[in-house]
Image (spheres, helix red, strand yellow):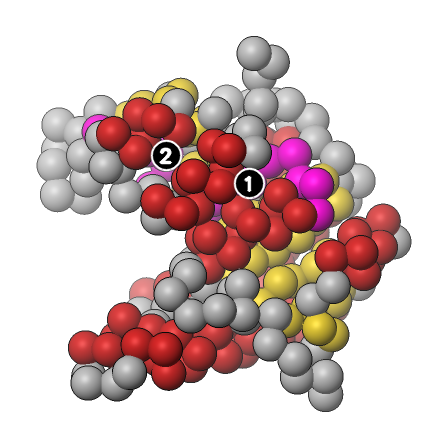
């Protein structure tokens, strides 16, 4: 198999909502958003076409609503709206540093964003715009990891880059276990069998069925996206 970690023409980057909060835990940290925008600009300047999916966990998570006695469907829709807030924040940060962007949402709200239409999304990419895909899949019970996998396949991305708080996949939680061992390359099937909580099962299955390689990397490592684009072996490859 060819090394999935090579130069790419089109990529999908999945950012967690929590990443935007930084040490604040909740809400949006403007300094973090600016730093992430600078990382994306560096990658964009190499000529690669970039799509982003950002979670909403820094504002609201559907499972939180359920734990508070709310109907799960209602909570999930609230979580989808949270991803739109994050997408607009990232759009503003990118446009302030000269990157043309479009936010496309799975739930229509035409006064703030375009509705997600696959051909339109691809056309924006071809015009060198960064696209930010918000509101998940538009359906409850699906995570933003699943949305990122689905959209990556739909738009013809060559890799899904999953940004996390650690520098790859480990055999157990490195925060809790000092003897955790980093895995440099692993198959989709092993991820499922070992129940490694990188992405949910639906997201992994979508990538496996469509041969979409996943690179799991440390979001806060400087120049990480650009290094992956340059072929440097950082993080973990799932293929």
Does the magenta segment cover residue 215?
no
Does the magenta segment cover residue 159?
yes
Q: Nearer the viewer, mark 1 or mark 2?
A: 1
Q: Nearer the viewer, residue 118 or 47?
A: 118
Whether residue 204 is situated above or below residue 151 in the rendered picture: above
Give the residue displayed 71% in from the left and 73% down from the top. Answer: 115
Do tag 1 and tag 2 residues touch (Cβ < 8 Å)? no
Q: Nearer the viewer, residue 32 or 188?
A: 188
Q: Which residue is mark 2?
A: 168
- In the rendering, which numbered label is found on residue 160? 1
Whether residue 116 is situated above or below residue 177 in the rendered picture: below
Question: Residue 120 appears at what percent x and percent y?
Answer: 81, 61
Compared across the picture, whether 15 is left or right of 183 comes to: right
Question: Residue 83 appears at what percent x and percent y?
Answer: 50, 71
Q: Nearer the viewer, residue 23 or 74?
A: 74
Q: CA distance from mark 1 to mark 2?
A: 14 Å
Compared across the picture, whether 65 is left or right of 175 comes to: right
Crowd tier of the residue under label 1, counting other residues whose Cα lies within 10 Å: few below 14, some 14–19, many 20 or above = many
* Label 1 or label 2, whichever comes before in sequence order: 1
> Which residue is outermost to the top?
1
Give the residue displayed 70% in from the left and 31% down from the top. Answer: 8
Q: Nearer the viewer, residue 37 or 128?
A: 128
Give the residue displayed 34% in from the left and 72% down from the top. Answer: 61
Question: Residue 11 appears at what percent x and percent y?
Answer: 65, 42
Q: Secondary structure at mark 1?
A: strand
Whether residue 53 is situated above or below residue 198 in the rendered picture: below
Whether residue 210 is situated above or below residue 44 in the rendered picture: above
> Which residue is outermost to the right?
127
Give the residue displayed 46% in from the left and 52% down from the top. Answer: 146
Q: Which residues are magenta?
A: 155-171
């Amino acid at each position: 198999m060819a090394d999935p970690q090579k130069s790419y023409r089109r990529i999908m980057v999945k950012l967690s909502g929590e990443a935007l909060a930084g040490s604040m835990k909740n809400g949006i940290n403007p300094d973090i958003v600016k730093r992430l925008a600078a990382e994306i600009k560096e990658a964009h300047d190499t000529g690669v076409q970039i799509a982003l999916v950002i979670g909403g966990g820094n504002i609201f998570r559907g499972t939180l609503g359920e734990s508070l006695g709310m109907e799960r469907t209602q909570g999930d829709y609230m979580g989808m709206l949270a991803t739109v807030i994050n997408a607009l924040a990232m759009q503003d940060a990118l446009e302030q540093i000269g990157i043309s962007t479009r936010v496309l949402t799975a739930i229509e709200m035409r006064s703030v964003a375009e509705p997600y239409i696959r051909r339109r999304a691809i056309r924006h990419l071809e015009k060198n715009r960064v696209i930010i895909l918000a509101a998940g899949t538009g359906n409850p019970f699906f995570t933003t990891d699943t949305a990122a996998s689905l959209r990556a396949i739909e738009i013809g991305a060559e890799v899904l880059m999953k940004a996390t708080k650690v520098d790859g996949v480990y055999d157990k939680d490195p925060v809790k276990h000092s003897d955790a061992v980093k895995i440099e390359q692993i198959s989709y099937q092993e991820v499922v069998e070992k129940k490694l909580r990188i992405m949910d099962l639906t997201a992994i299955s979508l990538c496996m069925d469509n041969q979409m390689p996943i690179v799991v990397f440390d979001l806060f490592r400087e120049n990480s996206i650009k290094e992956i684009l340059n072929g440097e072996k950082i993080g973990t490859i799932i293929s």
